[in-house]
Amino acid sequence: SAPQFLSSKMGLRASGLRPHARLSAAKGLRTLGLRPVTMTATSPATKIEGPAWDNSDEYSSLSDPKLLADLAEVKEGIEAMTLLGAKIDVKDLDSVDPKVLIEATKKSTEISVLLGNVFSYANFEFSVDGTNAEARTLISELRGVSSKLTQAAQPVSLALKLAPQSVVDQYLDALPEEKFNVEHQRKLKDLTLSLEEENLITSLSVDGLNSWGQLYDTISSTLQCQVGDETMGVAKAAALLASPDEETRLNAWTGIQNAWRVHEEASAAILNSIAGWRLETNRKRATKAGKSVHFLDTALHQNRMSKKTLDAMMLAITEAKPLGQRAVKLQAKALGKEKLHPSDLMAPPPEIAGATTLQMPYQDGINLIKDSVNTVDTSVGEFVKMMSDKKWIEGREGDTKRPGAYCSGFTKSRNPRVYLSAYTGSFQHVSTLAHELGHAFHSWVMRDMERAETRYPMNLAETASIFFETVVGDNLVDMAETPQEKLKYSWYDAESAIAFLLNIPTRFDFESKIYEDRENGKSFTPSYLRETMENAWEGRYGDSLSAYDPMFWATKLHFSITGAQFYNFPYSFGYLFALGVYAQQESKGADFHQAYVDLLRDTGRMTAEECVQKHLGVSIEDPEFWRGSIRYPASLSLSFQHA
């Protein structure tokens, strides 16, 4: 099938979250013989420069002859795919030749690798400079080329979904690595439309569904906002939300809010059109299947998990709502405020007498992450060093950079890349860097596998990223020399509880509500979206905040991503699942590293339920699993309360 550029493996991960959790001082990395990390004392006023990545080992520029040659080969390959597809009679699948399916799959994989490589380079260029017209033009062209590839591969996709099992068995005898993907896609057999209808949806999505997401990216990367006396891009303003100065945070938050209010009609049209497109597609498929299609069905299928698992997790999270609200109130108390404002939710811990300020130059941040993950296995630390040494990390500041952070990579070399809109040395940025390096490590340990088995879903993708953050957080707590410093780092345990027990569920509640209303004929207006978002915040945060965030539906890019639906609940899944994995390292001892790698390698060839059952021996359709995982942040929040 055609490459999914915004899918979990090679897609964007601009989470905006700084999740962190540790087990306890007694069960921390001290028992693993962690060695201290040397950090440079840096004044908070000192300007810290983020790293610049170097992608010249793939292409030298957007006009590089190698890039143009790859793109030309893609277009030639699509013509070959079209000819192969013509040999498949989708109305007589009993007579389809498995050899044609096998040849077409191999050709599609070759084309997808080249197309993905060119897209990655163009996307990286556009992320660094949202005004880069050449990159924007190429991305638009690539979306069209991707649509043509999908259409050319559609007869193969339909045949593999609908053909008799005997045909599929012959196909899988030759390509056993495709087994999981084929079986997973065959679950959609009843919802599959005709070849003509599927191709029509694909072709229209280029200037329909996907163009709305591209419009959001264009607005967000070029949007300017007023922060105090300074005009800056939203990515730079967003970095100020982690400032220790309350006025700076509020000015940045207000500036971002005001900037998006100017574009609220366009932003509402984006959400309205994306939701309308998806729901209308669901209605067409429901008519074909003769059964209803819920707006969550696609997201659950993308994440390879059951509705029962989602319900079990959300039940446990809802039960833990008081825990998250208590964490908000404790942070407010620590900051000397009656209640936190939304602009305070990424605030660093208050200055405490006897505690040092963590302000880490980039290389110190890399060393901290490297030495932390070395406790799992030295090869993991060597990977972090390699990422930095090869200049595969981007973290410079810039007014036209794409907001957020993500991990992606080049499909030809299978070499990952990490992007941060800004690295300024704060704990949040060190934590975000660790998070994205975890994603990169996940891809790295799968680079020798068949490509078909490396497409893992978003919920399981968060396993390695949050694991990395957890290890780094434990390192910092272990390094703390005074009770005041331990208190300071326990701040981020409370922040994690807030993010995953309140903020992510708020996003889920909001998106569920607007899809319910859109399904019933409601058209989104800015006032409706602001009101619905405030209700979602109130439902989760209760009275723990002094105000809510009415423009969150516009300022948070996740709602406008078109390649993945409900880009929210998988984060809470990954957070709680990662804690379960992390808890096993002591019991497994020296065997943990290999067990951990084995788990990561299975994420592309199993459902979420199967993967957890195999590696943790539990059912995630049982709320008790999630309640057990929540006990860890609960105990950490209690530690913060008594610190």
Image: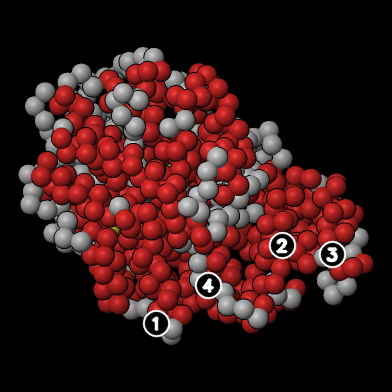
The image quadrant where one finds the C terminus is top left
Residue 581 percent location from the top left of the image? 47, 35
| Residue 60 left/right relative to 399 | right
Q: Quadrant of the N terminus?
A: bottom right
Mark 1 or mark 2, whichever is nearer to me = 2
Q: Which sits earlier in the primary sequence, circle 2 or circle 4? A: 2
Query: In the image, is residue 522 above or below residue 505?
Result: below
> Measuring 12% from the left and 33% from the top, which residue is drawn there?
351
| First in residue order: circle 1 vs circle 2 | 2
The answer to whether one can see residue 3 in this image is yes
Residue drawn at x 34%, y 33% as measured from the top left: 22
- Which residue type does callout 3 highlight? Pro
Q: Residue at x 48, y 40 (%)?
A: 463
Q: Nearer the viewer, residue 513 or 24?
A: 24
Q: CA distance from mark 3 to mark 4?
A: 27 Å
**Disc nearer the start of the sequence (3/4):** 3
Which of disc 2 and disc 3 is earlier in sequence? 3
Q: Which residue carries the number 2 mark? A: 186
| Badge 2: residue crowd in 10 Å (few <14, some 14–19, many ≥20) | some
What kind of residue is marked 2?
Answer: Arg
Q: Secondary structure at mark 1?
A: loop
Tag shown at residue 294: 4
